[in-house]
Image (spheres, rainbow, N blue to C red):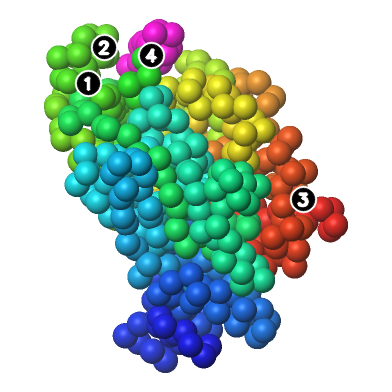
Amino acid sequence: MNHFKGIVSTPADTDTYRIDRWAVQETLQAAYVVYPADATDISLAIQFAQAQALPLAIRGGGHNTSGASSSEGLVIDMRNMNSVRVDKEARVGYVQGGATIGQAQTEFLKYGLATPLGHCSTVGVIGLAIAGGLSSSMGEHGLTCDNILSATVVVANGVIVHANARENSDLLWAIKGGGSNFGVISELGMRLHVPPPELCKLELAYLPEQLSDVVMELNAWLKVQTPPETLFFGMALGPDGKPLLILNGLGSFNAEEGARLWNRFLQLGPIAHNTAQIPFSKRTYLADETPGLEGPKIALGCHIDKFDYGTVKKSFDTWVSLARSAPASIVLYEFYHYDLQSRVPLEAAAYPHRTTDKVVVILVQGFSDMGFVPEARKGAERLKKCITSSSTASAKNSVGYLNYSNHLAADNTTDANARRAYGANYPRLQQLKQKYDPEIVFNKWFCIRPSDAA
């Protein structure tokens, strides 16, 4: 690649060749790993891969468990393009394609600003944003993708395209939920907001025999949940290896208000509890402990529109069985305030889940035997079927939140999963795939087929 300013690495280059992934089972030995310095480098890499008939993958943060960021051909590793800049007057943040949530939020907060991002500092901003983007501030500011204002995208023919509301707005529409189907994101422009200086954090643990009371109280709380409130209800093994029910909360208010809003859960008699006021800057690091776990990881998401004791109890029992083989496995019900994002018209962006259905994530981990991976996937599927069993057909048939539906995203032998994921938005996405990637160069994640190939 003549004129490439970044780093070109092969397996012989032990000092620069990096193919490690968060989910180790998705590691592939690439013929080339390239680290671009700018959008022109990205263009050169895409053209080189096509000229050499090399399959192509894009690595942002490397957290996806689908294998979308790995390839035996050429990997465009964005980690060196990680700068973040802020236009304070316009309240817009510009994030390069390799920046992590931690890097972006740190820079934004220097200006007293923030945007809806997740709770794990090492996740890549771009991968989060272009698949939707859930966060505890979505009740007040919407999904991450709904805060995308502009993008610089290197498309399949190597052309650098600037997309915003005035030019190439169709491409901007597509990347707001359409993932990596349309090109490599060199930079995103994101709407920024003034965050609260502090947050209220809740941490509770209950015994399994308290499940009925916890589910009943959560259903009562859901009827009066306010936009600043988020609760996460989970199943996990405690330090002694025994099953526990976990209830964590995050709210953009002080501890006194948190005590008033969440006292109902303290009245249930948790075996452990902590309510604290934390700086807003700590939000980005709250989930860092789990991603640090070594070994294979299987993630699977689902949607529910019914949260009843009978179904949750069956799901708990199914999870306990799976945790015997994968003891760090968790099930997490994510009770964000979904109303604001659900009011965005479906046709306003590619993101397909404009309902108030609740997101659930299943994470199977804590095992080292790679031979167990197929059974781990089957276990996750069994658990998903159980979790959604009392919900309506539309929730049952959902692939789940796109960034959690990882092995479904990787099954691209047909476009059945992409059709299922995008629903009514799929025909327009096919048209845009035909326009920007007719040869299906970008095919690693919910691969959309061009309209001519339908």
Could you tell me residue 204's position as x and y percent? 23, 25
Q: Which residue is drawn at 35% across and 82% down?
A: 16
Mark 2 neighbour density, 10 Å: few (under 14) some (14–19) many (20 or more): some
Query: Which residue matches tag 3?
Result: 431
Tally the marks: 4
- Give the residues drawn in magenta, as a range: 210-225
Seen in the image, is 123 located left or right of residue 102?
Answer: right
The kind of residue on which mark 4 rests is Gln
Badge 3 density bin: few <14, some 14–19, many ≥20, Cα 10 Å: some
Q: What residue type is labelled 1?
A: Phe
* Measured Cα–Cα span from mark 3 to mark 1: 44 Å
Give how far across and how far down residue 129 sits, in percent.
Answer: 47, 46
User: Does the magenta-highlighted stretch encompass residue 187?
Assistant: no
In this rendering, does residue 313 appear at all?
yes
In the rendered structure, find residue 253 and report the number of the disc placed on it: 1
Residue at image mark 4: 225
Camera-nearest label, 4 or 3 = 3
Instruction: Judge the density around disc 4: few (<14), some (14-19), many (≥20) Cα neighbours within 10 Å.
Output: some
Given contact means CB atoms under 8 Å apart, are the residues at marks 1 and 2 in contact?
A: yes
Q: Residue 261 got which mark?
A: 2
Mark 1 element type: loop
Quarter of the figure with residue 60: bottom left
Badges 4 and 3: C-beta atoms under 8 Å apart?
no
